[in-house]
Amino acid sequence: MDNKSYQDFYFKKAKMQGYRSRSAFKLIELNKKFNFLKKGIKLLDVGAFPGGWCQVASQNVKNGQIIAIDKKKIIQIKNVKIIEGDFLDENTKKKILKFFNSKIDVILSDMAPNTSGNKSLDTIRTNELCLSILEFSKNTLDKNGVVISKLFMGEDFEEIKAYAKKTFQKINFFKPNSSRDNSRETYIHCNRLNS
Ligand SMILES: C[S@@+](CC[C@H](N)C(=O)[O-])C[C@H]1O[C@@H](n2cnc3c(N)ncnc32)[C@H](O)[C@@H]1O
């Protein structure tokens, strides 16, 4: 499928199924592969605007707690606590910890910086965000918890992989079909923190 057909296909599909973004299908595929959206979990979704992933999480996580964070304002979603703020800001992190008041079961990040047009710079910035999620998870994730984060194939890919391997017992990479072929984007799935 060429890029334009791809965009049209997932755009229409999202519209028909009532999702706010095409990204929703990436989380559906990720969950099919790794099965982490479960009853009663505490789930954090970072870089959540406009809310496609949160919609999928809200549909699948019954009796749990979900927080969605983005610098942009997200319109309310059923069963989701929304925090408008920069994840890199310590105050935002404090708000997350206060709300959950215990370890988190699943941390998701689809964070992406504003694109600069410079592929190399965009890759570095995206991967810095991925690293900030892995670092945050070290002290906040339940020891059997799961982290899934967007990252880009690029110069610092190996560095992130090494950091994740040191921090978690198991890591995998997965690129959903709904992620464009010509995009450098992939997702890292990490579980079970090393103690
Ligand atoms: C690809 S979009 C996320 C799409 C979303 N997963 C969905 O399903 O609708 C990436 C988002 O990351 C957010 N973002 C980037 N850096 C951020 C940061 N430091 N803190 C919070 N959000 C951030 C952007 O504002 C943007 O809305």
Image (cartoon, rainbow, N blue to C red):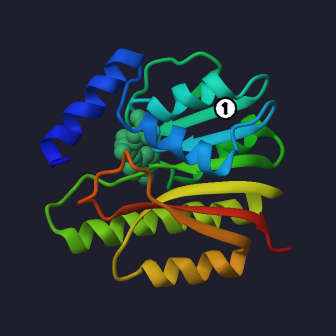
Q: Residue 30's x, y, as percent?
A: 55, 47
Q: Is residue 115 left or right of residue 80?
A: left
Considering only vertical position in the picture, is 92 above or below 61? below
Residue 131 visible somewhere in the drawing = yes
Residue indicated by mark 1: 66
- Which quarter of the rendered picture does the C terminus lie within? bottom right
Q: Residue 172's x, y, as percent?
A: 60, 67
Considering only vertical position in the picture, is 31 above or below 129? above
At 76% from the left edge and 47% from the top edge, which residue is drawn?
105
At 40% from the left edge and 28% from the top edge, which residue is drawn?
73
Q: Is residue 45 left or right of residue 158?
A: right
Q: Residue 132's x, y, as percent?
A: 54, 64
Q: Residue 13's x, y, as percent?
A: 33, 25
Q: Amino acid at mark 1?
A: Ile
Q: Quadrant of residue 45?
A: top right
At 38% from the left edge and 24% from the top edge, which residue is drawn?
20
At 61% from the left edge and 50% from the top edge, which residue is drawn?
33
Q: Is residue 124 left or right of residue 27?
A: left
Residue ranking furthest to the front: 1
Q: How many marks?
A: 1
Q: Is residue 100 left or right of residue 160?
A: right
Secondary structure of the residue carrying tag 1 is: strand
Residue 141 visible somewhere in the drawing = no
Q: Assess disc 1: are there few (<14), some (14-19) or many (≥20) residues with their C-alpha within 10 Å of its C-alpha.
A: many
Q: Quadrant of residue 125?
A: bottom left
Ligand 1: image quarter: top left
Q: Nearer the viewer, residue 134 or 86?
A: 134
Q: Nearer the viewer, residue 94 or 195?
A: 195
Considering only vertical position in the picture, is 12 above or below 149? above
